[in-house]
Image: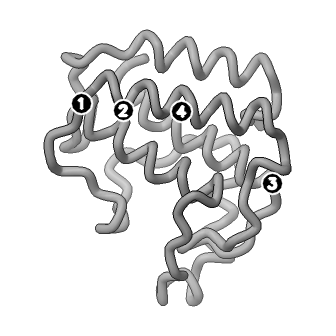
């Protein structure tokens, strides 16, 4: 499975982020490109341990079962529900959000396992560094495909 610890996968993800433009139209969903970048920055900040949200009640109930969908090669379904805390509906500076996301991907790629948190994911629960890397790659891939990059 693709992940940010693999230099080729990280480089490909960075090239796709670079190809994203402010006017890119989503193939599905409600976010614009700037909002998607802000959304991904929240997710990456959690993976890196910069932001440590509490576990969600629903995560305690079904997170371990749903974790299988995070750790397989099947793409996320279009229009999957988003935790309200991770929704980005306001106005965001595209260039700042893009730069931040590039920085986060580089931190994971260059830092390896030690760059990622041991704090549980709010929905999926405890993840190994490899699972964080795979899950964040898959999440980013989902949203880059959403914007056709």
Q: Is residue 60 shown above or below 133?
A: below
Q: Nearer the viewer, mark 3 or mark 4?
A: 3
Q: Is residue 86 visible?
A: yes
Q: Which residue is mark 3?
A: 129
Q: Please tell me which residue is depicted at 69% across the width and 71% down the height of the picture.
A: 119
Question: How far is mark 4 from mark 1, CA to CA?
Answer: 21 Å
Circle 1 Cα neighbour tier, 10 Å, few/some/many (<14 / 14–19 / ≥20): few
* Of pointers 1 and 3, the one earlier in the residue sequence: 1
Q: Nearer the viewer, mark 4 or mark 1?
A: 1
Mark 4 in CB contact with mark 1 (< 8 angstroms):
no
Q: Which residue is mark 1?
A: 93
The answer to whether 91 appears left or right of 24 in the picture is: left
The answer to whether 52 appears left or right of 87 in the picture is: right
Q: Element under label 3? A: helix
Q: Which residue is mark 2?
A: 97
Mark 2 in CB contact with mark 1 (< 8 angstroms):
yes
* Of pointers 2 and 3, the one earlier in the residue sequence: 2
Quarter of the image with the N terminus is top right
- Pinpoint residue 84: horizontal percent, then vertical percent: 29, 67
* Of pointers 3 and 4, the one earlier in the residue sequence: 3
Residue in front for this viewpoint, 114 or 4: 114
* Of pointers 4 and 1, the one earlier in the residue sequence: 1
Question: How far is mark 1 from mark 3, CA to CA?
Answer: 30 Å
Q: Nearer the viewer, mark 4 or mark 2?
A: 2
Q: Which mark is residue 141?
A: 4
């Amino acid at each position: 499975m693709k992940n940010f610890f693999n230099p080729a996968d990280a480089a490909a993800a960075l090239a796709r982020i670079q190809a994203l433009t402010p006017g890119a139209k989503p193939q599905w969903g409600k976010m614009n490109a700037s909002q998607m970048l802000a959304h991904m920055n929240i997710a990456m900040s959690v993976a890196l341990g910069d932001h440590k949200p509490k576990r969600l009640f629903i995560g305690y109930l079904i997170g371990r079962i749903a974790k299988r969908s995070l750790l397989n090669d099947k793409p996320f379904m279009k229009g999957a529900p988003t935790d309200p805390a991770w929704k980005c509906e306001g106005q965001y500076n595209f260039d700042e959000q893009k730069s931040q996301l590039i920085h986060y991907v580089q931190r994971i790629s260059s830092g390896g396992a030690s760059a990622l948190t041991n704090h549980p994911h709010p929905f999926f629960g405890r993840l190994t560094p490899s699972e964080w890397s795979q899950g964040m790659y898959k999440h980013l891939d989902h949203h880059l495909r959403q914007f056709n990059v």
